[in-house]
Image (cartoon, rainbow, N blue to C red):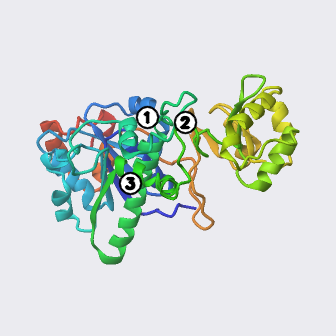
Amino acid sequence: MAGPLTGVRVIELGAIGPAPFAGMLLGDLGAEVIRVARHGDDAAAQRAVHGVLLRGRRFVQADLKAPGGAELVRRLVQGADVLTEGFRPGVAERLGIGPDDLLAGNPRLVYGRMTGWGQDGPLAASAGHDINYIALSGALAPCVGSDGAPVAPLNMLGDFGGGGMLLAVGVLAALLHARATGEGQVVDAAIVDGSALLTAMHQAMLGSGLWAAPPGGNIFDGGAPFYGVYRTADDRWLSVGAIEPAFYADFVRGLGMPGLPDRDDPANWPQLKQQVAARIAERSLEEWTDAFAGLEACVAPVLDPAEAPDHPQLAAREVYREWDGLRHPAPAPRFSATTVDWPPTAEATDSTYDVLREIGCSTDELDQWTSSGVITAAPKGDQE
């Protein structure tokens, strides 16, 4: 059965990181995603670099700076529901494919814009990457390592959590509005906005005084002995999240350490952490996993990406799946009535002429775009 977004067509202007992640999410939900790749980019090479993010796409190879490039995009979006782009502010407008240009021909279009700093503000035109956006938004400072220095959680927090994920959420909300009213709109998704949004609970704790210690001394930043990771005897790591009293009681039971200092007094946390660390260092990760089996201690082994797919819980739900020579995280969330197709039906190959013919472009138009350098000549077997 097709996914819940079956029938939705998305035009994705070539970008990296968060914008393709949003396209992947929409495609996983059943949308048809057509990626307009930069002229000369090889689809196979893009797949090698971005891999999983580009699953389920068809590719249109085009030079948007060439005469006629803007017209090609306008033709693509005439029958589309969504366009996404990841240019710096003003670039799409200079290319003649900004919101005013495209909404004039398709008033129902949802125009999704993915940037780091947003469409306005003093840094709007500045360069940046995930680590810069989460640093400035206040999301990086609380994520500290053992030496107290901030440690970025890869580029998952900004690029993907606060960026691509929220672009997809914004697009879905705007799609509902367009379906109900016939009115399209611009979705301004900025990583700095999204990463700030992800600090909502942290902001509440700051405001209520529950996050008052220096970095590394609070409940979720490694300060609490019942929330963190501990090294095992075989140099592996055990994660512990025994926050609630009942779970902590099972944690202490699994450790075999009755009579520990009161964990509700933060003054005891440093001593408690040392005691727990010394105890966990006595056994291997497998031994501790077995010791906590059947207890509700909120304990789990830290698995690397190669190990995770084989864990019984993840294997039972097929959280990771092999396709096209790559390991893919499965589409999420899951739906009871509109089951998402897997594997993706489209492959990351150049479909320029197929797509343009499907939307009604004539041979004369294709020849004109070819002669002006917007698209390359069709392979011999694809010529009419």
Task: Please tell me which of labels 2 and 1 falls first in the chain.
Answer: 1
Q: Quadrant of residue 140?
A: top left
Q: Check disc 2 and report the residue beneath it.
A: 324
* Front disc: 3 or 2: 3
Quadrant for residue 245, please give it: bottom right
Describe the element under mark 2 as helix, strand or loop. loop
- What residue do we see at 69% from left, 32% from top? 307
Does residue 109 sit above or below 48 in this rendering?
A: below
Q: Which residue is mark 1?
A: 50
- For label 1, the SS is helix
> Residue 251 lies in what quarter of the image?
top right
| Residue 82 visible | yes
Quadrant occupied by the N terminus: bottom right
Residue named by callout 3:
167
**Residue drawn 52% across and 35% down?**
144
Closer to the observer: label 1 or label 3?
3
The mark nearer the N terminus, 1 or 3, is 1
Front residue of 260 and 183:
260
Secondary structure type for disc 3: helix
